[in-house]
Structure formats: structure tokens, C-alpha cells
Amino acid sequence: MNKIEKKEETPLLSIYFTAGYPDLDSTLHIAKKLEDAGADFLEIGFPYSDPVADGPVIQHSSEVALGNGMTLTILFEQLRHLREQVSIPVFLMGYVNPVLQFGVEKFCEACKNAGVDGVIIPDLPMYEYEELYQEIFEKNGLANIFIVTPQTSEERIRKIDNLSNSFIYLLSSNATTGKTLDVGENTNAYFKRIHDMQLKNPLIVGFGISDKATFQKASTYTTGAIIGSAFVKRLNEQDYLEKIPEFIKSIKD
């Protein structure tokens, strides 16, 4: 399931949210509502105290989630019931330090047991993954999602493509999360350059996608896009679960 299929006619929508936010036990409720509303796959963030790549909205959600008591142990306890309720691909996203503290092999086994399809760990170096962890990930059927930025060389991108078996996370810029997508000529040229490399793995764009217009723009040369901060903001609203279908509809319809 961890392979995200290329779909040229319909861009895929992924939604990011932070486990344990706004409430400790909200993780599976949100995931199920997102699938029912039409999200194509999910990214569940595990909170960390120093989320350096995240903008203020996701930083705040991490702080609240940690304050609520969310840990990897509690998250995996919640995810034991994931596949009873959610069938679309699910990826965990977070930083390497909590994974190392938890234990990499234990983490990968817990992902496998929960039915998690892959992980996105932006600060895990590629060489470290290759040398130390690739065998453990593959043994547990877990995809490791690599990140490409506008500054990533073609040589590195092709190596990432060879190491990947799900999708490649294409950062729209080097900014932190929550910034508005720059839809100028430079961004278009960057997306087109990667598209024209004819990589075997689909490209999914993240950072700066917040509404239908930016979702469609980001998907012009890619298989789909990820919405994070704009969705996490909505979780502050009263009756946020009941408003999820309306949010997804506003992006996809």
C-alpha cells in the first residue's frame, strides 16, 4: 500500500496533522473523518520539542500535543486500531531524535504492526539511512520518504529516486511550513525541471499549499500536494470534526 500511484488526471490530496492535537485522543477521529471526506493519503506528525522546519502553526500544535501528553508510545497504542478505521495510506512525519530515543528497530516494528506505510524524517541524513537503517526499514515494509528542495542537485535527486519506493516529497521552497506558495516563474521552472527528469516515483509537493488555487498550481507538474498548516489551523475551531468534509470539498471540488 505504501506506493503512491501516479495519477495524471486527478491530483492526490494529502493532509498533515499533528498526533495529539487538539486533544490527546483526537488522532484517529481526525484520520477517519479525513478519509471519509476524500483525502487520498495522510501524514500524521509525531510532536517534538524543537521542530526546526515547521512554521508557527505546526510548532504550536506540537507544543499543545506534548502538553497533552502525546508520546510515540501513546501514538502507537492509538494506532493499534488504525486499520480498523482507515484504509488509505498513512505516513508518520517527525524528527529523528524521538525515533532514536524510542529505538529505530522498535519504531519500525511498531509502524509495521500499526499498518503505517512509511515515514518522513527530514533530518535523517541519506548516508545514515543507507548505512544504518535501510535494511531495518525494508524488513518492516516501511517506505522512507526523502525530501527534495530547489537546491537539490540532479545527481542527488536520481539517487533519492533509486532509494525510494513510495513518493518523493518535493518542497516548494526552503521556507518553513505555513508560508504561502510562491507561484512565480522560478517555482514553475523548478517543478517542471523535476517533472522532466521522468523519475520512477511520483512527486508530492509540500509547504505553502493552503487552498484550491495553490493545490491545483502545485499539482500542475506533480502527482499531488500536501496541506498542513492550513488544515491544522482549522482544528482550533469549534466542532472541527464536523467541518472537515467542507474543508476537503473546498480543495478538491
Image (tube, helix red, strand yellow):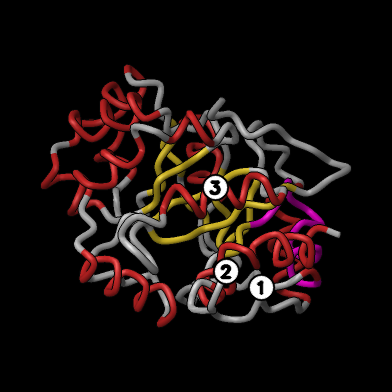
Secondary element under disc 1, as helix, strand or loop, is: loop
Q: CA distance from mark 3 to mark 2?
A: 12 Å
Q: Quadrant of residue 19?
A: bottom left
Q: State the image quarter where residue 103 is shown.
A: top left
**Residue in the picture at 34% in, 32% down:** 80
Disc 2 marks which amino acid? Phe
Q: Which mark is residue 230?
A: none
- Density class for disc 3 (Cα within 10 Å; few <14, some 14-19, many ≥20) is many
Q: Amino acid at mark 1?
A: Ser
Alpha-carbon distance for marks 2 and 1?
A: 8 Å
- Magenta residues span 213-225
Residue 57 place in picture, x, y as percent? 44, 79
Residue found 18% across the figure and 54% down from its top: 97
Q: Which residue is mark 2?
A: 231
Q: Amino acid at mark 3?
A: Leu
Residue at x 19% of width, y 62% of height = 69
Residue 210: mark: 1
Q: Are marks 1 and 3 in contact (CB under 8 Å)?
A: no
Q: Which residue is mark 3?
A: 42
The residue carrying pointer 2 sits among few (fewer than 14), some (14 to 19) or many (20 or more) residues within 10 Å by Cα, namely many
Could you tell me which residue is drawn at 33 percent across and 21 percent down?
Answer: 140
Earlier sequence position, callout 3 versus callout 2: 3
